[in-house]
Amino acid sequence: MLALDHIVIAANDPEKAADRFGEKHNITVIEGGQHTNWGTYNYLAYFTNDCYIEWIGIFDETTAARSKNPLIHLLFRELAEGNEGPIQVALRTDQMDDYVLNLQERDLPFAGPIPGSRERPDGSLLEWRMLFPEGDRKVLPFLIEWGEVKNTPQDPKLINNKAINSISIPGAASGKFTSIYQLNTENQIVQLENTALKGSDDLNFSIG
């Protein structure tokens, strides 16, 4: 079964956006690091149900504009159009190759797996792979598989004593959606390993 890994929030100034959110919800946010190959950087907030929020922005527009990563394409477009806020969701798996095979067998378009990495402020390296199912005029959640080092704080005190209780995604309860991600739905709710996934007109989430 898949788990919610993180929610991606586009921000012109990730530090300020994260700090405002942290003050409003009484949560701790920390600096993430730079994705030098994509020209982006992030700030993060971690939660007890093994997921986090990522505020991501661009420090090098030329590099970001040339990126072949669908997430960076989306980020660049949203910020260029003046849109800030939640734009994407990552669902965590440790069976990425099985999902690639599932998409191939169902003749569904996708991009990836795309490798990613960033250096954390302490100098340690995070590595991962991303898989992007492609939808009809809508952004579908991407799948992420972490390498040997998982993206969790080295200091457990930085994990907020709150959880992302639920997340709503357009079309989440549809047959095509559950087929792509090999999930089951009951009463229009999809139960992930660590939270509930619901259908909605807009991407949103609740914390408690």
Image (cartoon, helix red, strand yellow):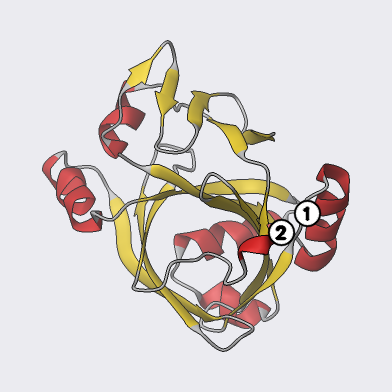
Specify the farthest residue to the bottom: 123
Q: Amino acid at mark 2?
A: Leu
Count of residue discs = 2
Q: Residue at x 75, y 51 (%)?
A: 84
Q: Is there any visible trace of residue 32 in the rendered image?
A: yes
Labels 2 and 1 touching (C-beta < 8 A): yes
- When asked about the image quadrant of residue 19, the answer is bottom right
Q: Which residue is mark 1?
A: 82
In percent of width and height, residue 172 lies at 45, 28
The kind of residue on which mark 1 rests is Gly
* Residue shown at 53% from the left, 50% from the top: 51
- Inspect this view and state whether residue 55 appears: no
**Label 2: which secondary element:** helix
| Quarter of the rendering occupied by the C terminus | top right
Position of 57 relative to 19 (above/below): below
* Real-space Cα separation, disc 2 to disc 1, in angstroms: 5 Å
**Which is more toward the observer, 31 or 142?**
31
Q: Residues within 10 Å of mark 2 (few under 14, many from 20)?
A: some
> What residue is pinned by disc 2?
79
176 horizontally vs 187: left or right: left
The quadrant of the image that shows the N terminus is top left
22 to 65, vertically: above or below = above
Residue 152 versus residue 50 in the image, above or below: below
In which image quadrant can residue 94 be found? bottom left
